[in-house]
Image (spheres, rainbow, N blue to C red):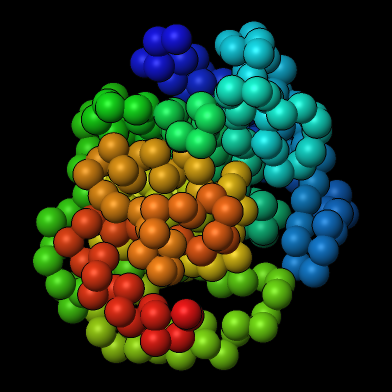
Amino acid sequence: MHLKEVTHKVIEIAKEAGAFIREQRKTFSPDKIEFKGLNDLVSYVDKTAEQIIVSALQLVLPEAGFITEEKTINRIGDKYNWIIDPLDGTTNFIHGLPVFSVSIALQEGDDLVVGVVYEINQDECFYAWKDSPAYLNGHEIRVTSTPTVDKCLLATGFPYYDFQKQTAYIELFAELMRSCHGLRRLGSAAVDLAYTACGRFDAFYEYNLNAWDVAAGIVIVRQAGGEVVNFKGGNEVLNTRELLATNGKITGETLRVIQKYFN
């Protein structure tokens, strides 16, 4: 399998789904919202976009299975699996806030080998494959080289359910807020990771994440020269539901702060 060719096919599919989402945003009505859980919103747009992506990817790699947010298909592959978030940032989409994306990754065994994040509003496609550079709209991107947190801009996300760690999270937020140039919360983990890969953020951290939120972004950050670990500093992040992505220079410093509150 030629990963570069596969990646460029995935880019086309992500943009096709993105075009559908962009068009639906023009006429979207809040009465189309469904609730999967507390503050966990979904609409026909998410589901239809996922169906568009799944149908196209089945032609790219027929033997692959799927791990998807909206569960429009139930099939796990023996070797290959696509990990898909058809609309990362659904709440932003519903409220008309222009930060939402399509996220598609390919997993071979336990290894993530392709990642594509298409930020729809800015028409920015971030992508990488195993052993490649990372790219934004065809131009190579790299993480920053900022050496210390006090010179960094950080990103995070807020939990929308499972609030057991809320107090620790707020205390961590407060300490980091005092220690860096600023903290941002965009509402799309896939975009946060892509922005870390291209140097707009120096690091991104969040807990209670799903594989489809972050799989594609992990590939892009790592191929852009960054580092992605869990809150204990290990490389397993898809199943731990916690993630720190950095430029590789500030991982240890940031982890020491995180570990005061999450251990």
Q: What residue is drawn where x is 57% and y is 90%?
A: 167
Residue 219 at what x, y percent from top left?
39, 39
Quadrant of image for the N terminus: top left
Closer to us: 151 or 24: 151
Closer to us: 237 or 31: 237
Q: What residue is drawn where x is 86% and y is 49%?
A: 32
Q: Is residue 218 visible?
A: yes
User: From the viewer's perspective, is 54 left or right of 125?
Assistant: right
Closer to us: 105 or 255: 255
Q: What residue is drawn where x is 47% and y is 39%?
A: 216
User: From the viewer's perspective, is 220 left or right of 41?
Assistant: left
Q: What residue is drawn where x is 70% and y is 54%?
A: 94
- 58 to 238, vertically: above or below: above
Q: Is residue 173 visible?
A: no
Residue 142 at what x, y percent from top left?
20, 43
Residue 188 at what x, y percent from top left?
53, 55
Residue 218: name its quadrant. Answer: top left
- 167 to 203, vertically: above or below: below
Residue 227 at what x, y percent from top left?
29, 52
Q: How many marks?
A: 0
